[in-house]
Image: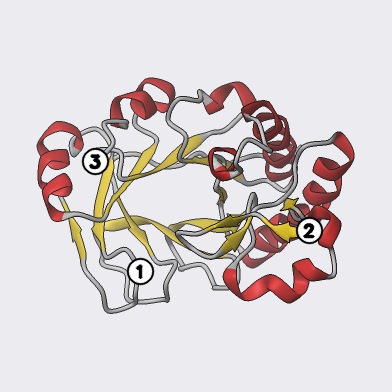
Amino acid sequence: MSVVLALPVGTDVDYQLGGERDVPSRVGIVVRDRTAQPVPERYNVCYVNAFQSQPGERRFWKRRWGLVLTRGGRPVVDTAWGEWLLDVRTPRKRARLARIVGGWIEGCAEDGFDAVEFDNLDSFTRSAGLLRAQHARRYARLLVLAAHEAGLAAGQKNLASYDGTRAGFDFAVAEECRRFRECRSYVEHYGRRVLAIEYRRKDFRRSCPRWGERISVLLRDRDLSPDGRRRWC
């Protein structure tokens, strides 16, 4: 297993999933999509949507229809983002999905990323009861193993109720943890290795005095657009 470089603490994070932009000197951690390039002289986190489809990848998943969660012959959709849920109910399907995502993870490592975050660990909560938490946890373990074998730290994305360190996750990316009163849970699990992304100004203003000295807190626009809102504590 390759050596994993831990997420740094005491520095700011920039969340650039909607497009690349300049990186201020105060920022030591940058999160970008797996199709983007990492930033030199920064700690780079590669975004991978591991539990759901990306909106632009439906053709890819139609060719692998058996791995898409369906109900009545139709895909189960995360309506907030228009993404199809992936079917992680059986060991065989989890293994097949892990091989696909494993290829993306290897690509992140080859491009020079230091870590990978796996989005939508909580997709089972949007599955109308078809998926269970245990399915997600078992699949997550395969993803973490693949990341570590590639030499990348692994980040838990959302689902504050779950202590991802049990699956081997190294850090957490917490969207709107102040809004949903979840920041404490992430800090209890990961200490200072938490990246908190807020989308509402009032949540950001309240989060900074409470958590800004311990973890990285960033205010972004929800679309994460290249010219959109961006502020640090």
Q: Is 126 or 23 nearer to us in this picture? A: 126
Amino acid under disc 1: Asp
Q: Is residue 200 left or right of residue 57?
A: left
Residue 126 can be seen, yes or no = yes
Q: Are marks 3 and 2 in contact (CB under 8 Å)?
A: no
Task: Name the image quarter holding residue 108.
Answer: bottom right
Upstream in the sequence, badge 1 or badge 2?
2
Q: Say which mark, if any, is on residue 179.
A: 3
Which element carries disc 1, helix, strand or loop?
A: loop
Badge 2 amino acid = Gly
Residue 90 appears in which quarter of the rendering?
A: top right
Distance (Cα) linking label 3 and label 1: 17 Å
Separation of marks 3 and 2 at Cα, in angstroms: 36 Å
Residue at the farthest front position: 72
Q: If you read the primary sequence from the N terminus, does the residue marked by circle 3 or circle 2 appear first? A: 2
Give the image location of residue 52, x and y in percent: 63, 55
Residue 141: % across, % down? 70, 32
Give how far across and how far down residue 55 sits, in percent: 58, 70
Pointer 3 or 1: first along the chain? 3
Mark 2 sits on what residue? 73
Tell me what residue is drawn at x 39 percent, y 35 percent.
Answer: 193
Image coordinates of residue 114 in percent, x first then y, are 56, 52
Residue receiving disc 1? 223
Looking at the picture, tell me which residue is in the foreground, 151 or 179.
179
Amino acid identity at mark 3: Arg
Residue located at (55% from left, 47% from top): 120
84 relative to 21, above or below? above
Q: Image point 77% across, 37% down: which residue?
A: 89
Name the residue located 75 percent from the left edge and 37 percent from the top edge. Answer: 142
Q: Are marks 3 and 1 in contact (CB under 8 Å)?
A: no
Give above or below for 35 relative to 180: below
